[in-house]
Amino acid sequence: MSTTTERLERLKKQEAQLKARIQQEQARISASARKERDGKLISWGVAVEQLLADDTFQAEWWKLQCQRVLSGRTLERALVQELASLENTTEHQLTP
């Protein structure tokens, strides 16, 4: 009976080790996906800043688009202080 108990304990230990390895791999995959998404979002942000700066996007049009798809803190982040200053200093051409 002790060999059966020992065997069961050994299998439980292996199971715990496998669960830990699975969790580590899932964390690695999640971190990689987050890194890729963050890079994409940063690139989009750079593009939008450039389009606002070179008058491709009208500031008011951009605000309306953000309000259409964003809300709460995300909307506040999209409509940062720089946008307000852009709107006050320059008239932007509407190009959807």
Image: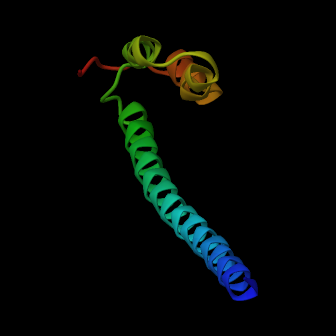
Task: List x then y, in percent, for residue 27.
Answer: 57, 63
Which picture quadrant has residue 22? bottom right
Is residue 91 shown to the viewer in this render?
Answer: no
Residue depicted at 69% across the width and 78% down the height: 13
Front residue of 56/14: it is 14
Task: List x then y, in percent, for residue 16.
Answer: 66, 71
Front residue of 17/58: it is 17
Which picture quadrant has residue 31? bottom right
Residue depicted at 58% across the width and 74% down the height: 18
Residue depicted at 64% across the width and 25% down the height: 81
Picture quarter with the N terminus: bottom right
Residue depicted at 44% across the width and 51% down the height: 37
Is residue 32 shown to the viewer in this render?
Answer: yes
| Residue 84, above or below 18 | above
Task: List x then y, in percent, for residue 82.
Answer: 59, 29
| Residue 33, above or below 48 | below
Front residue of 87/62: it is 62
